Every structure is written in structure tokens, then in C-alpha cells.
């Protein structure tokens, strides 16, 4: 199931916070079919290889998020609109 599918199935208009820990496909998920991303106010993404912090951060910034590394959780990006 895709994130777009989940958003549609549950008729989610806005999500305040999304936590993503998907073991290496983060950059793929956030770069394909990103209609869902427009409905997310903030998220925390745990980065696993082959995804990279810079790659994920770049995609998030190009979609209107301000990003920072999570000081308490290594390898995590916090993104807020």
C-alpha cells in the first residue's frame, strides 16, 4: 500500500505528524507520488542506507519543509512546514 492510498482510504485531509522508519527506501517513498506530502504538517524520518541525509533533506526542502537533524535521535530528520 502506498501513502497516497492510505491518505485516500482513510480520507485524511491533514496529518499533523508523520513518523517514517522504512529501512532504506525513504528517498524513494518521498520522491514518488508525493500528493500525500502536501497534507503533512510535520514529520520525522529515520534515514537508512542507501538513502542519505542530504538526499532526503533535499527532497523535503523542495516540497516546502524546513529541516533539521534530530539532536536526540541520530540519523533522523525533523521536517516542519
Image (tube, rainbow, N blue to C red):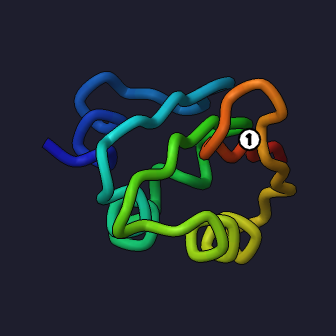
Q: Quadrant of residue 54?
A: bottom right
Tell me if residue 50 comes above or below residue 44 in the rendering: below
Quick check: 46 left or right of 70? left
Image coordinates of residue 1 in percent, x first then y, are 13, 42
The residue depicted at 61 percent of the width and 45 percent of the height is 75
List the single residue furthest toward the front. Answer: 74
Tell me if residue 71 comes above or below residue 29 in the rendering: above
Image coordinates of residue 45 in percent, x first then y, are 55, 42
Packing grade of label 1 (10 A; few <14, some 14-19, many >=20) is many
Pick whichever, 67 or 62, lies toward us: 67
Q: Quadrant of residue 62?
A: bottom right
The residue depicted at 52 percent of the width and 41 percent of the height is 46
The residue depicted at 74 percent of the width and 41 percent of the height is 78
Tell me if residue 75 comes above or below residue 13 in the rendering: below
> Label 1 belongs to which residue?
78
Image coordinates of residue 5 in percent, x first then y, are 23, 43
Amino acid at each position: 500500500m502506498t501513502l497516497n492510498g492510505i491518505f485516500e482510504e482513510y480520507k485524511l485531509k491533514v496529518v499533523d505528524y508523520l513518523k517514517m522508519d522504512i529501512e532504506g527506501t525513504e528517498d524513494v517513498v518521498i520522491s514518488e507520488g508525493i500528493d500525500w506530502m502536501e497534507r503533512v504538517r510535520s514529520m520525522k524520518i529515520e534515514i537508512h542506507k542507501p538513502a542519505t541525509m542530504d538526499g532526503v533533506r533535499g527532497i523535503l526542502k523542495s516540497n516546502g519543509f524546513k529541516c533539521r537533524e534530530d539532536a536526540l535521535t541520530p540519523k533522523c530528520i525533523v521536517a516542519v512546514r
